[in-house]
Image (spheres, grey):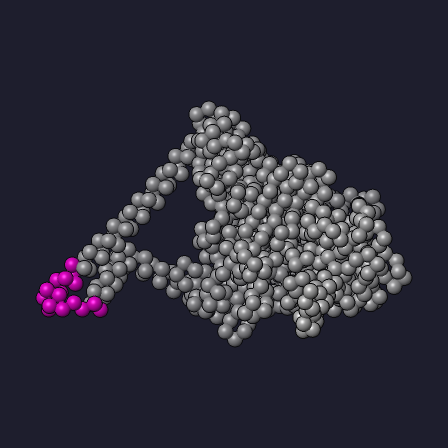
């Protein structure tokens, strides 16, 4: 036998040592441990496990992070039990469980493995999965525990999101509470197993925040960009489990999905050239992705203003319902089912929830089955692969439907049952659209042929084609059409008349378009019946909020001019400052100072953000709003009645100072005038004084009534539901009055600031608010009196029964004495603004 050369012997010995070192680097066996400062690294250097401190925190956690991006933590073991020093130890117990020990050698986290292993090994895999297995077995079927079963805020490739149907065990994501605290938040991202076809759903506590729509065999049809080529989606629905996962298309792609505490998840891809994460997309994508944004049987269209409308074949239950997303609702138009209805195709839609499914039926069979049953509201394919197969049918309200953008490959066709008249109307509308297209093409073709003939004639005359002449010829024809229609002269004259009436700086449309990135959806702050509000940045760096009047808004030029004229004359620190306007062509824009903290309702009605407003801030907002109203009623050059004071029209600046906004509905008085009347009652139900809602009478005291509602909402953190809805089981005024009569007004206080507030000061505010919402205007205090009451300890008068609770049948808008206009809502209110 030949002896190996010394060089070969030492090479072989070194190779063995390398193998042993590599094995030891990514795993620990029974009796071994890692302490704070030591790590495990997966075999191909993809992931690392060890102890870390998140953000600015000094607490220590056991986690797994990307080796090439150590700040990107993918998994945390002891999310609810931080270690306060660097004494942490990860070890394997005698029975084969992973244990995390603190300084007292007490277990603060354990894998709680159900099986006892003779030779246990804990290994960090290159997938980022920490597994517990036997020293012999390496198959995933032999893992007795794995971190992939207990996700944190990150979904990694091959990690399953879903259910074990035999045991009821669920895997889902929960976000960190903050960058410094990995404790699970109230948000969760899950695969919904209660539906016939799997869906992804984000929950805020137990409330649905957003849903993806059903899995259609290729993607979740309510989420854009999920057909991107860098990864593949997989949904499996087996007898013992149902789950969603993804995997990259090749080993060179590194991608992850991360959930934030606001309910948004982001898809990230690693860019090797810059060594940074690139955000591929986020979801929810826009406000139409919010769950049931427009209520039942309605359609959300992000490309339109307003974005909510009833689906064809449905009508709004009552117009005031559209003031709040919680109460929006459309109902079916009356129709006799046999022969009186048909099915209208709506293309590229996010399918509604609560459907019946049959995977073996074709679309034709699905249609036949739905046609036979008058209670069947709609039908669609459940799968889009192979030209479409499977059947989905809806028998109740169509909830959480949206129109998907043409820009992206998403959405699905749905066929909804509509009356024959609507079906014919839709066909007629489509014919008119096609006719317009044909006419437009014919005109353009005719002009082109005419220009071509002129050019040929000129060439024949001069034996040379002059292309600039042909271009000028084409332009000339367009100008003739433009001038002959009279449209240009009409628009120019209207704009000139409008501009002459306004005493305010004028902005060019190009300047505003550039500042808002051409009114990009990413810069949209909110919207109401008037149109949308966009954030913009001028060339000098000044941030602005741009109110863009919708072409179909009921708030027309008169309301816009009213707001401009009023605002240009008002100067007060508790009023939003109007910087200028732009009226050019059909565009009508108002430019305001930007309010970074958005509107008051953005905070007080949100379960998380409400905690940012302690009582001192809330009282500061109450007093500031009162001073703003006092200025309008008494100290400005004109006496001004706002007529639409509400939480969404109180904006907050950097220092949380309140500023009253939206003067489109305001009315002015001169001299000693203090009240007026109107046949067009517009505003927001829930804030309207009784005399205004029923008889169209408004005064400074109607603003005082609205202020009282505002104070009750700030104190309680609850929305005041429609005051004149007799079926409403709860509104803040009724609740406050009942508690006041029982001698328990403190129970109205929002729990989030209850321990830190001055109870006497809060109860005094409740007392003042009840005086403000008295039924008769003469029983309500004036704003100077309100300011005095807020700033002193003087004895207050005892309130009578509030206005909304007095003789409700005779004073509500449904009574015979009510004017027809009193049931209308304000199409120009600023109800859904999320900031300026």
Q: What type of secondary structure mainly makes up the magenta span? A: helix
Magenta segment includes 455: yes
Q: Residue farthest to the right?
A: 104
Position of the C terminus by quadrant? bottom right
Q: Is residue 196 left or right of residue 500?
A: right
Residue placed most toward the observer, 569 or 728: 728
Q: Which residues are the magenta region?
A: 453-468
Nearest the viewer among 77 and 79 is 77
The x and y percentages for residue 27 are 74, 60
Q: Quadrant of the N terminus?
A: bottom right
Question: Is the residue 17 above or below the residue 705 in the image?
Answer: below
Residue at the far front in the pictured view: 1
Residue drawn 44% across the image and 36% down it = 344
Q: Residue at x 65, y 57 (%)?
A: 127
Q: Find the residue positioned furthest to the bottom.
A: 540
Name the spot of residue 303 as percent of width and height, x first.
48, 52
The residue that appears at 82% across and 60% down in the rendered structure is: 32
User: Does the segment drawn in magenta span residue 161?
Assistant: no
In the image, residue 753 lies at what x, y percent? 78, 57
Residue furthest left in the image: 461
């Amino acid at each position: 036998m030949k002896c190996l050369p010394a060089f070969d012997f030492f090479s072989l010995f070194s190779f063995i040592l390398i193998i042993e070192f590599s094995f030891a680097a990514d795993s620990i066996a029974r009796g071994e441990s890692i302490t704070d400062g030591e790590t495990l690294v997966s075999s191909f250097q993809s992931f690392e496990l060890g102890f870390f401190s998140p953000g600015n925190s000094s607490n220590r956690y056991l986690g797994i992070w990307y080796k090439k991006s150590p700040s990107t933590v993918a998994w945390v073991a002891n999310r609810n039990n931080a270690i306060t020093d660097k004494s942490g130890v990860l070890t394997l117990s005698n029975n084969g469980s992973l244990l995390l020990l603190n300084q007292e050698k007490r277990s603060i986290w354990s894998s709680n493995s159900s099986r006892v292993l003779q030779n246990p090994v804990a290994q960090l895999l290159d997938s980022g999965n920490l597994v517990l297995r036997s020293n012999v077995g390496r198959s995933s079927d032999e893992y007795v525990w794995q971190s992939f079963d207990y996700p944190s805020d990150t979904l990694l490739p091959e990690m399953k999101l879903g259910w074990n149907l035999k045991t009821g065990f669920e895997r889902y994501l929960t976000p960190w509470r903050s960058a410094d605290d990995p404790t699970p938040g109230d948000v969760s991202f899950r695969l919904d197993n209660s539906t016939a076809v799997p869906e992804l759903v984000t929950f805020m506590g137990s409330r649905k925040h957003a849903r993806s729509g059903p899995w259609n065999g290729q993607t979740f049809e309510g989420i854009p960009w999920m057909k991107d080529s860098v990864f593949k989606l997989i949904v499996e629905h087996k007898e013992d489990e149902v789950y969603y996962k993804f995997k990259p298309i090749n080993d060179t792609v590194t991608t992850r999905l991360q959930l934030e505490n606001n309910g948004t998840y982001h898809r990230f891809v690693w860019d090797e050239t810059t060594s940074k994460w690139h955000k591929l997309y986020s979801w929810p994508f826009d406000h139409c992705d919010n769950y049931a944004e427009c209520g039942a049987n309605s359609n959300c269209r992000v490309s339109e203003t307003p974005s909510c409308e009833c689906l064809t074949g449905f009508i709004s239950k009552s117009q005031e319902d559209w003031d709040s997303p919680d109460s929006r609702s459309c109902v079916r138009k009356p129709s006799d089912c046999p022969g009186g209805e048909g099915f209208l195709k709506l293309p590229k839609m996010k399918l509604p929830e609560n459907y019946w499914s049959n995977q073996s039926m074709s679309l034709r069979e699905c249609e036949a089955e739905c046609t036979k049953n008058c209670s069947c509201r709609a039908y669609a394919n459940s799968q889009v692969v192979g030209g479409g197969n499977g059947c989905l049918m809806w028998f109740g309200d169509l909830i959480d439907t949206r129109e998907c953008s043409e820009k992206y490959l998403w959405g699905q066709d749905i066929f909804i049952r509509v009356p024959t008249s609507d079906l014919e109307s839709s066909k007629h509308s489509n014919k008119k659209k096609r006719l317009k297209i044909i006419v437009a093409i014919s005109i353009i073709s005719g002009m082109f042929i005419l220009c071509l003939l002129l050019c040929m004639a000129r060439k024949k005359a001069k034996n040379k084609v002059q292309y600039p002449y042909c271009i000028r010829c084409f332009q000339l024809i367009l100008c003739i059409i433009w001038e002959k229609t009279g449209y240009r002269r009409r628009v120019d004259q209207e704009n000139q008349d409008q501009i002459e009436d306004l005493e305010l700086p004028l902005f060019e449309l190009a300047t505003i378009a550039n500042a808002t990135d051409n009114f990009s959806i990413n810069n949209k702050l909110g919207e109401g019946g008037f149109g949308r509000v966009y954030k913009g940045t001028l060339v000098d760096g000044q941030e602005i909020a741009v109110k863009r009047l919708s072409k179909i808004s009921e708030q027309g030029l008169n309301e816009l001019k009213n707001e401009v004229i009023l605002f240009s004359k008002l100067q007060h620190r508790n009023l939003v400052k109007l910087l200028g306007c732009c009226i050019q062509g059909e565009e009508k824009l108002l430019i305001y100072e930007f309010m970074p903290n958005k509107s008051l309702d953005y905070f007080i009605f949100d379960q998380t953000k409400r905690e940012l407003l302690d009582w001192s801030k809330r009282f500061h907002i109450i007093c500031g709003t009162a001073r703003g109203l006092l200025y309008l009623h008494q100290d400005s050059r004109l006496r001004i009645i706002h007529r639409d004071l509400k939480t969404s029209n109180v904006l907050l600046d950097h220092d949380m100072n309140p500023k009253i906004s939206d003067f489109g509905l305001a009315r002015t008085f001169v001299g000693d005038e203090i009240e007026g009347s109107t046949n067009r009652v517009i505003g927001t139900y829930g804030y309207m004084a009784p005399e205004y809602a029923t008889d169209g009478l408004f005064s400074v005291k109607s603003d005082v009534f609205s202020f009282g509602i505002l104070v009750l909402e700030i104190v309680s953190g609850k929305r005041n539901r429609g005051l004149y809805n007799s079926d409403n089981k709860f509104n803040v005024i009724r609740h406050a009055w009942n508690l006041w009569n029982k001698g328990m007004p403190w129970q109205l206080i929002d729990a989030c600031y209850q321990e830190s507030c001055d109870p006497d000061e809060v109860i005094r505010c409740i007392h003042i608010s009840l005086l403000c919402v008295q039924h008769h205007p003469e029983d309500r205090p004036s704003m100077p009196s309100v300011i005095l009451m807020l700033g002193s300890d003087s004895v207050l008068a005892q309130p009578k029964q509030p206005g909304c609770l007095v003789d409700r049948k005779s004073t509500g808008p449904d009574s015979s004495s009510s004017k027809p206009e009193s049931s209308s809502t304000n199409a120009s209110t600023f109800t859904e603004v999320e900031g300026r």
